[in-house]
């Protein structure tokens, strides 16, 4: 198998990872007292699940991309994208709760 065949799943993973920024299945609740935010809860289930799958897929592809620098770079990009989506899904970053 040549490099293009081994990189194709990584390009698909990057595409799915980018699409995950636009697809949301969220739960959000907040309460305030006297105009002050007292509690806020946010989770994006789609980002959390897709991020975990991307992260694990990227890790698996790192081990399969021995000697192929492009595939290694793409695998690391998928891992980082997966980690961002997990953090986003848990409301750690890019959350309406601040």
Image: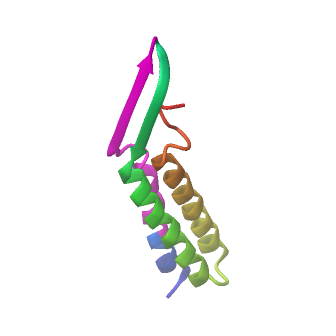
Could you say where residue 93 lies in the image, as x and y percent from the top left?
56, 42
Give the residue at x 37% y 51%: 45
Could you say where residue 8 lies in the image, as x and y percent from the top left?
46, 72
Q: From where the camera sits, is residue 15 visible?
A: no
Give the residue at x 64% y 67%: 73
Examine the image and state in which quarter residue 26 appears: top left
Q: How is the image coloured?
A: rainbow
Residue range in magenta is 10-34
Could you say where residue 32 lies in the image, as x and y percent from the top left?
43, 20
Numbered circles on residues, count: 0
In screen coordinates, is 94 left or right of 19?
right
Name of the residue lying farthest toward the bottom: 1
Name of the residue lying farthest toward the front: 33
The residue lying toward the viewer, choosing from 14 and 34, is: 34
Give the residue at x 34% y 41%: 27
Is residue 16 located in the magenta-colored stretch of the structure?
yes
In screen coordinates, is 84 left or right of 23?
right
């Amino acid at each position: 198998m040549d490099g293009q065949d081994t990189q194709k799943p990584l390009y698909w993973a990057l595409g799915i990872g980018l699409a995950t920024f636009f697809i949301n299945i969220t739960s959000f609740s907040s309460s305030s007292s006297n105009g002050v935010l007292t509690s806020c809860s946010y989770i994006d289930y789609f980002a959390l699940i897709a991020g975990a799958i991307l992260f694990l897929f990227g890790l698996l592809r790192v081990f399969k991309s021995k000697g192929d620098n492009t595939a290694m770079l793409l695998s690391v990009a998928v891992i980082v994208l997966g980690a961002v989506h997990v953090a986003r899904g848990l409301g750690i970053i890019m959350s309406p709760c601040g």
